Image (spheres, grey):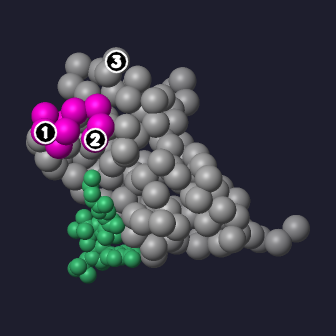
Amino acid sequence: MKPERILGLGTDLVEIDRIQDSYDRFGDRFLEKIFHPSEIHYARSQARPSIPLAARFAAKEATSKAFGTGIGASLPWLGMEIGRHPSGEPFLLFHQEGADLAQQRGVTRTLLSLTHTRTHSAATVILIGS
Ligand SMILES: CC(C)(COP(=O)(O)OP(=O)(O)OC[C@H]1O[C@@H](n2cnc3c(N)ncnc32)[C@H](O)[C@@H]1OP(=O)(O)O)[C@@H](O)C(=O)NCCC(=O)NCCS
């Protein structure tokens, strides 16, 4: 069996107020462009939805940095989804173009960590392959 190796590392920090402002300006159109229904559903179950939304936004930007692509045609917002284990631990899923990119790069698993303060949310992503 080939040993695993780290293929990429990304981090991002997001101002929670910026996410709230985008929602106030563009409403559900903004949410649906960036987030999967499961992500919106989880955020809406929380006291301040803009906090988990900002963390998920940060996770997607961090993933795009780990790949080195940025967000775009090869890795669109909806090509990534942040899930949550019953323990609270987050995980990353790839869809469509995101899944194609992950497969091309040989990514077999990922690590994701999120954090928040009153004003900011941040995420770190590691891509692992063999
Ligand atoms: C790659 C991306 C996520 C960077 O995010 P950002 O918010 O512009 O910038 P940040 O301050 O978080 O990060 C900047 C750092 O990212 C790193 N970075 C830039 N491009 C990168 C890439 N292709 N791969 C990895 N890291 C990259 C650099 O180290 C940069 O620091 P530097 O300017 O000091 O060199 C961004 O280019 C992107 O694709 N954003 C999507 C934007 C978008 O569609 N917004 C619309 C919202 S609806």
Q: Which mark is residue 111?
A: none
Q: Which badge, 2 or 3, comes first in the chain's sequence?
A: 2
Left or right: 77 in relation to 105: left
Q: Are marks 3 and 1 in contact (CB under 8 Å)?
A: no
* Residues packed near mark 3 inside 10 Å, few (<14), some (14 to 19) or many (20 plus): few
Q: Which badge, 3 or 1, comes first in the chain's sequence?
A: 1
**Residue 64 falls in which quadrant of the image?**
bottom left
Left or right: 126 in relation to 113: right
**Main secondary-structure element of the magenta-colored stretch:** helix
At 13% from the left and 39% from the top, the residue drawn is 25
- Which one is in front in this view, the residue at disc 2 or the one at disc 3? 2
Which residue was labeled with disc 2?
30
Q: Are marks 2 and 3 in contact (CB under 8 Å)?
A: no
At 13% from the left and 34% from the top, the residue drawn is 24
What amino acid is at disc 3?
Ser
What amino acid is at disc 2?
Phe
* Residues packed near mark 1 inside 10 Å, few (<14), some (14 to 19) or many (20 plus): few
Q: What residue range appears in magenta?
A: 22-30
What amino acid is at disc 1?
Arg
Which residue was labeled with disc 1?
25
The x and y percentages for residue 45 are: 34, 18
